[in-house]
Image (cartoon, helix red, strand yellow):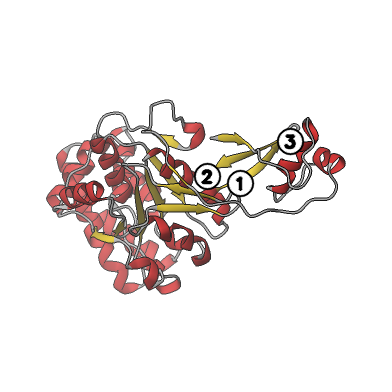
């Protein structure tokens, strides 16, 4: 979303483009050279905070704005009541935290629910360099114009989309604080740079994912953030369900899928021997797809399952022995 910055200049108003540039200068953090030349003396003004709400989202929202409309319902096999719980949270506008190990189906679940609820989905991959402006938006200089560009969080709030912050603890805590007003009864997003209060449109929902395993030892969410979310716990499905998922997603025979799941169960026990994370269902699907395309099972597991797990020689040797014994 792009908006040309406009306003009323202070003091004596000059007609024409000088007044226009004065309005731009007053509200920008970065001053374009053409504006600086025409209006060298400037200062920022305080703008009134007025809640704004946009209309319901349309299919005109595009991937260029980070918005996805999930066509159909991606395959997802429930292992509990997570679908019902999430649906009720969405109806109430409650934020949700998905907790579970890597590759257990958190992302597939949120894609499935976005399609089921017929809501657009905006996904944000969190990382150390993620800033509040990356979420809310910023001014950009394009030609001789200064335009405001909404960030993904603002776009989701304006248009009633589901906003999914993937691996939220990877972001700095001072950045995550910006989501707090959207997670309580206020349902607003203050945008400091424009002085705007964006009121979340109907259908907006904030969802975060969190791996309590390896991330808990290094990073964690502040209690003031954690306690704003309804939590849905995920884990690897039961063996029979996981084999069904692997067979459906990879195209291998049921017997091969069962063997891959049994291998994964054995490898996951190596966490007691120092393996940081066991193989997720996603890795089993990748190995299954290679097997379905004609790669020998041992080689497929070496490439898609063993290699991504560790570089430790002892663990690699132990996993290779398990592959040979299981397949």
Q: Position of residue 132 (x, y in %)?
A: 55, 56
Under circle 2, the secondary element is: loop
Against 125, residue 14 (above or below) is above
Q: Position of residue 183 (x, y in %)?
A: 36, 58
Left or right position of 289 against 124: left
For disc 1, the neighbor class at 10 Å (few under 14, some 14 to 19, many from 20) is some
Q: Position of residue 304 (x, y in %)?
A: 37, 47
Residue displayed at 43% across by 26% down: 60
Left or right position of 198 against 110: right
Q: Quadrant of residue 143?
A: top right
Under circle 3, the secondary element is: helix
- Of residues 150 and 70, the one drawn nearer to the viewer in this rendering: 150
Q: Earlier in the sequence, mark 2 or mark 3?
A: 3
The residue that mark 3 highlights is: 20
Residue with the most extreme top position: 60
Question: Is residue 75 visible to us here?
Answer: yes
Residue 63, numbered label: none
Residue 151, numbered label: 2
Residue displayed at 30% across by 73% down: 272
Q: Quadrant of residue 314?
A: bottom left
Under circle 1, the secondary element is: strand
């Amino acid at each position: 979303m792009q908006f040309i910055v406009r306003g009323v200049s202070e003091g004596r108003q000059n007609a024409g483009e000088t007044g226009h540039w004065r309005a731009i200068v007053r509200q920008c953090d970065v001053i374009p050279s053409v504006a600086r030349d025409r209006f060298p003396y400037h200062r920022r003004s305080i703008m009134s905070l007025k809640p704004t709400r946009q209309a319901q989202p349309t299919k005109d929202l595009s991937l260029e704005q980070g918005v996805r409309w999930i066509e159909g319902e991606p395959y997802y096999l429930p292992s509990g009541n997570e679908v019902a719980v999430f649906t009720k949270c969405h109806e109430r506008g409650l934020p949700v935290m998905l907790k579970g190990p890597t590759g257990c189906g958190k992302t597939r679940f949120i894609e499935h629910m976005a399609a089921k609820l017929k809501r657009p989905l905006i996904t944000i991959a969190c990382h150390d360099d993620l800033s509040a402006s990356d979420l809310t938006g910023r001014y950009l200089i394009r030609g001789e114009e200064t335009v405001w560009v909404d960030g993904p969080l603002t776009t989701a709030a304006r248009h009633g989309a589901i906003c999914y912050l993937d691996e939220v603890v990877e972001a700095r805590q001072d950045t995550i604080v910006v989501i707090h007003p959207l997670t309580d009864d206020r349902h607003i997003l203050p945008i400091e740079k424009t002085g705007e209060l964006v009121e979340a449109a109907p259908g907006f929902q904030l969802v975060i994912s969190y791996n309590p395993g390896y991330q808990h030892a290094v990073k964690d969410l502040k209690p003031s953030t954690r306690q704003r979310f309804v939590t849905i716990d995920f884990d690897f499905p039961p063996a029979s369900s996981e084999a069904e998922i692997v067979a459906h997603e990879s195209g291998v025979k049921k017997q091969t899928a069962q063997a891959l799941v049994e291998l994964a169960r054995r490898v996951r026990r190596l966490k007691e021997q120092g393996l940081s994370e066991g193989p997720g269902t996603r890795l089993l699907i990748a190995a299954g797809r290679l097997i379905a395309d004609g790669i020998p099972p041992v080689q497929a597991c070496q490439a898609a399952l063993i290699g991504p797990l560790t570089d430790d020689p002892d663990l690699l040797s132990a996993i290779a022995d398990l592959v040979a014994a299981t397949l």
